[in-house]
Image (tube, rainbow, N blue to C red):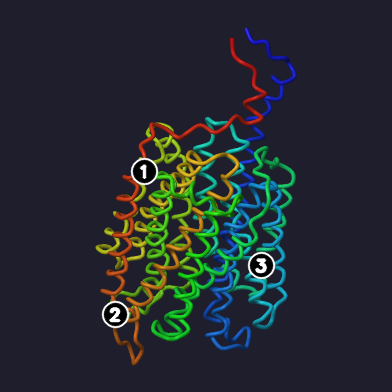
Amino acid sequence: MSDAPARPAEAGSAAPPRSNAVVAVLALAGIVVSLMQTLVIPIVPELPRLLDAPASDTAWAVTATLLAAAVATPVVGRLGDMVGKRRMLVVSILLLVSGSVVCALADSLVPMIVGRALQGLSAAVVPLGISILRDVVPAEKLAGSTAVMSASLGVGGALGLPAAAFIADNWDWHVLFWTSAALGVVSLLLVLLFVPESPNRAGGRFDLVGSLGLSAGLVALLLTVSKGADWGWTSATTLGLAVAAVVILVAWGGWELRAKQPLVDLRTTAKTQVLFTNLASVALGFSMFAMSLVLPQLLQLPEQTGYGLGRSMLTVGLVLAPQGLVMMVMSAVSAGITKAKGPKVTLMTGALIVAAGYGLNILLMSEVWHLILVSCVIGAGVGFTYGALPALIMSAVDPSQTGAANSLNTLMRSLGTSFASAIAGVILAQMTTDLGGYALPSENGFKVVMAIGAGAALVAFLLATFIPRQRAAAPAPETPAEIAEPAKA
């Protein structure tokens, strides 16, 4: 019979409902951040007119978010480990709300770029949320909770596009950002009410030099990748930024290896499980971008091309929306496989499903239902992989490092997406067809991009084979709920 006192038993019995609330609130926060990233898509072609600025300048409204997210994710993750993950989660959501309000009030380019940069600084919400789950959710629920939190990215993106298209078609474009601000406020209030602070803290001194070095290196790298096509891949600006990125990141790596309290513990990152999980994340990020690029264009290109379906942006959103629901459903299946076989098997399974989805897309691309089917198949694979990646990372690092480690993994996926965008852009710009004097991406160009997406998913599968085998997901450290629960007789 247990010697535990009655009072802890009451606390333990109340813990499961609270843990469910924590998961739901954190998943909502992830969906809101993902919505923020997609809300602007329907108005991107109209930004030059809306902001009275050249298209080359309005493109910075998208680039600013990308750069800010890349810089903020590892920095905020490390700060979360040091001063509290919930605290940094609140800061991130406040930045999202602030950026949304700035964009909602903007009628010119500069405030729009500032607002979008502030929104980008909230990108660490999902890795922070996953790290909080490890600290406060009972071990037996961790795999499922992590999968749900990870799936929130895809759900927000899939549901955000049709919602944004509907709002943009029926109201003033500023309503998009007021909506983002309102959702951010709701998410913030729920976090303050239901999410506890994580008990694990790394403490120590923040690596300011390391953060500045990584930020400078990432900005140079991402500018090279995202703007190289506009500036010219052999231009002095592009080549100069590429060289600067290499030099800065190499110097940054040397600093991090010598620092007593580095921003990123490169020795931990070099562990076999962490290293190959991050490499697989780059390949998956590369693969996933192909779908978000190809499917919308196939739906919107004129029917006169012979392969375009001539549909509206709202239709594009509705076609892609089921993918988010599939991802959420598959998160539960993903958690079951992770518990039974380990996250490595889940990751490999997901990568194969993604590759199969792209293969299917090469054969089926002439009807709307074809693209719905393809997006759902790929979404199922993404649901598996998104749940497995953080599980692999968290089972390999100390609890005091989960914020930084998950944030770095998120950054790896983003880098893969950025590289895919550049390569796919080059392919579609070279493989074109003429329609009324306009050069449009050809059908074969889309098929090549999809084949590359399938190949990247297979590379992720191959990289995952090098991850040490686990029978099941590593248990989380004892949570307050588990400590409070009395032993059974």
What's the mark number on residue 353? none
Q: Mark 2 or 3 closer to N-term? A: 3
Determine whether label 2 and label 3 are within 8 Å by CB.
no
What's the mark number on residue 431? 2
Q: Where is residue 164 in the image (x, y as percent from the top left)?
A: 57, 67
Q: Where is residue 393 in the image (x, y as percent from the top left)?
A: 48, 44
Which one is nearer the viewer's eye here, 351 or 402?
Answer: 402
The amino acid beneath tag 2 is: Met
The amino acid beneath tag 1 is: Ile
Instruction: Identify whether 478 is placed above or below 390.
Output: above
Residue at 46% from the left image edge and 58% from the top image edge: 413
Estimate how packed mark 2 is, as few (under 14), some (14 to 19) or many (20 or more) residues with alpha carbons within 10 Å: some
Estimate how packed mark 3 is, as few (under 14), some (14 to 19) or many (20 or more) residues with alpha carbons within 10 Å: many
Question: Which of the 4 image quadrants contains residue 91?
Answer: bottom right
Q: Mark 2 or 1 closer to N-term? A: 2
In this view of the protein, can residue 166 be seen by the observer? no
Residue at 59% from the left image edge and 60% from the top image edge: 210
- Label 1 to label 3: alpha-carbon separation: 36 Å
> Is 79 left, or right, of 408 in this rendering?
right
* Residue bearing the label numbered 1: 467
- Label 2 to label 1: alpha-carbon separation: 37 Å
Nearer to us: label 1 or label 3:
1
* SS under mark 2: loop
Instruction: Identify whether 270 is placed above or below 54.
Output: above
